[in-house]
Image (cartoon, rainbow, N blue to C red):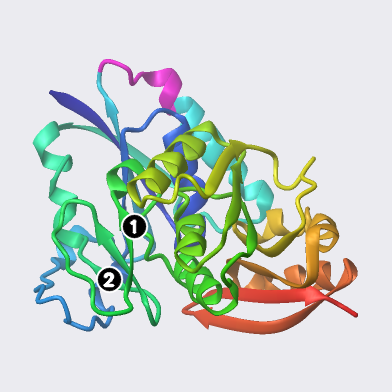
Amino acid sequence: MKWSEVSIHSTNEAVEAISNILLEAGAYGVSIEDPAELIKERDNVFGEIYQLNPADFPAEGVMIKAYYSSDEFNDEVATTIKANVDQLADFDLDLGHNTMKISEVDEEDWATAWKKYYHPEKISETVTVVPTWEEYTPLEGEKIISLDPGMAFGTGTHPTTVLCVRAIEKYVKTGHTVLDVGTGSGVLSVAAALFGASRIQAMDLDNVAVTVAKDNCEVNKVGHIVEVFQNNLLNGIETKANVIVANILAEIIVLFTDDVARLLQDDGVFITSGIIEDKKQRVIDALLASGLEIVEENKISEWVSLVAKVRK
């Protein structure tokens, strides 16, 4: 079977937004080629041998690739994708080269080849992300999140996800109520459930994300705890939460900080990431204006996460 491969040369900052556009356009899978993987330090605790070929990665920026059935892909789909990606500049996203290339590939060239880059990876003190096709025996006290990135928005190991999971590990307690805004793959809801949350509402504007999050929650056996539904940020939500988490763009975070302050319980925390370093202050200013205070800030590479509480 032939597939249409759409390659977009952009930046790390724009990866999640562009991936979402590609999936909304009907992509069966998305892969990310980030040259940072070539220099990433890995604790070789799983017996894996990482042999990445520099020729598979762009010299600069990030290559985002999506795959469509050739029978379903046409000029209209391509034009829509390009127009939607170009519009991301309106959100002050750095799109880098922002070039798009379309080519035809055989199914076997993409359906399984990407799996060689994806292995069990420990992302916090106790959480390890494991691909669904690999056998893995957890260590004592280790919590496992099973993911199949072929059906999700990523591998669960992006710095913004890692920052949120580490904060969830610290702040989510048994019996907590959690709101997951812009849930995407649902990985943060899964993490919250693993740390004892008894009620989780996970929401996303994108129907594809809702479906993926539900699937991932079922795979990780937390579907009975996580309610996944379509919603625009926190509009119409009345659930008071111990923890609200949002791993989305800085430009979107600033739109609902008032709702965050309204819905946080006493001593509740707002965990947020998806914030590029040079946009951090904009988010901080919005949080402060909504009556919140910053209690923690963490960073991986150029990505920042913030933890805030209602100011007393």
Question: Dots 2 and 1: beta carbons under 8 Å?
Answer: yes
- Check disc 1 and report the residue beneath it: 155
Residue 226 within the segment the image draws in magenta: no
Residue 84 is at least partly visible in this image: yes
In the displayed structure, does residue 79 sit left or right of residue 64?
Answer: right
Cα distance between the residues tagged 2 and 1: 10 Å
Q: Quadrant of the N terminus?
A: top left
Residue 277 is at least partly visible in this image: no
Label 2 crowd bin: few (<14), some (14–19), many (20+), radius 10 Å? many
In the displayed structure, does residue 108 sit left or right of residue 175?
Answer: left
Q: Residue at x 61, y 44 (%)?
A: 203
Q: Position of residue 172 (x, y in %)?
A: 58, 71
Q: Quadrant of residue 52?
A: bottom left
Quick check: 145 above or below 186?
Answer: below
User: Is tag 2's residue or tag 1's residue first in the polypeptide sequence?
Assistant: 2
Q: Residue at x 23, y 52 (%)?
A: 132
Query: Over which residues does the magenta segment extend?
Result: 71-78
Relative depth, front residue between 62 and 109: 109
Q: Residue at x 19, y 61 (%)?
A: 117
Residue 73 within the segment the image draws in magenta: yes
Q: Residue at x 38, y 44 (%)?
A: 218
Q: Quadrant of residue 287?
A: bottom right
- Check disc 2 and report the residue beneath it: 121
Label 1 crowd bin: few (<14), some (14–19), many (20+), radius 10 Å? many
Q: Quadrant of residue 141?
A: bottom left
Q: Position of residue 94 (x, y in %)?
A: 56, 59
